[in-house]
Amino acid sequence: MSKIHYKSVEEIALIRESSLLVSKTLGEIAKVIGPGVKTIDLNKLAETYIRDNGGIPAFLNYHGFPYSLCISLNDQVVHGFPGNRELVDGDLVSVDCGAELNGFIGDSAYTFAIGEVSEQVKKLMRVTMECLDLGVQKAVVGNRIGDISYAVQEHAEKNGFGVVRELVGHGVGIKLHEKPEVPNYGKRGSGVKLEEGMVIAIEPMINGGKAGVKFWDDGWTVSTVDAKPSAHYEHTVAVGKGKPDILSTFLFVDKVLHEKVNI
Ligand code: MG
Ligand code: MG
């Protein structure tokens, strides 16, 4: 069994660079995503942008995954395939991106609303984002993984949403998926102790209805059992003393979405 890889200050600086590339890639996606856009074209854009900036798409060929992005529509939770489906008004689109730069990996995901979505979907997006923020705030020295897990679960469930059990966050940086697992459900004060040098991907996957998921025959796509929508946000975070050090950022996405609203 592999052990937790504790990163040096220098390694964390490099993971920050890879995470920045991922964050900028999501910002590029934000610029073009909208009705009429094919998700395969978003995949192409991301792959080109990552390579043009000296990186390698971390998902491409990972255990045979055939794309640079995971794009999961509506009731798809994660690991969806980009394709020829054109986005339409009302779609909910989770875009998950990983990039390797100088041998280090960053991982981040953002869920976009296409045009107008329902009030319930807006609430799902807001609560899932809040779950991420609450989880991230627990990524400090002295806490345990269960403190992150509990914060996410408690907030999602109190809002009536389902917390996916089958898929979890993870250590990240040298490899895409490292120890420890970072579940979105659990008990306060339980699990691995958080220490300096740990870099983890915190990624709430929150369902609008039941927590249950099904796995598709394509070997990758995961969707909700009740066909209700699902949202997913993710940051790469270095455990910090007193406060978390968030290595990825939604600033690039936020800037674009804000500009779109004000056109
Ligand atoms: Mg991810
Ligand atoms: Mg991840």
Image (cartoon, rainbow, N blue to C red):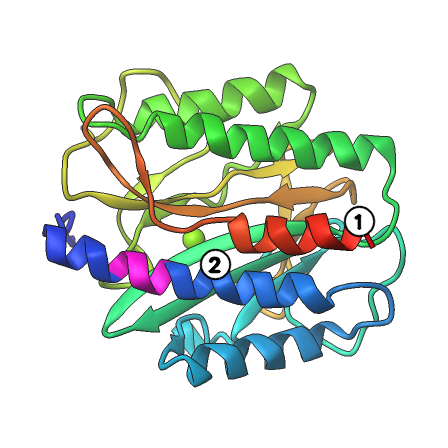
Q: Residues within 10 Å of mark 1 (few under 14, many from 20)?
A: few
Question: Is residue 6 shown left or right of residue 222?
Answer: left
Q: Please tell me whether the stretch drawn in magenta is mainly helix, strand or loop.
A: helix
How far from the left and from the top, in percent, is residue 193?
Answer: 18, 28
Provide the residue span drawn in magenta: 15-19
User: Which mark identifies residue 262?
Assistant: 1
Image point 68% across, 43% down: which residue? 230
Q: Distance from label 1 to label 2 (Cα)?
A: 22 Å
How far from the left and from the top, in percent, is residue 72?
Answer: 66, 58
Image point 21% across, 56% down: which residue? 13
Of 185 and 42, which appears nearest the observer? 42
- Hey, what amino acid is under mark 2? Ser
Question: Is residue 190 shown left or right of residue 158?
Answer: left
Identify the image quadrant of the C terminus. Answer: bottom right
Looking at the image, the residue that sits furthest to the front is 263
Image point 50% across, 43% down: which residue? 166
Image point 46% across, 33% down: which residue? 184
Determine which quarter of the picture holds residue 20. Answer: bottom left
How far from the left and from the top, in percent, is residue 144?
Answer: 25, 25
Nearest to viewer (mark 1 / mark 2): 1
- Hey, what amino acid is under mark 1? Asn
User: Which mark identifies residue 23?
Assistant: 2
* Above or below 44: residue 106: above
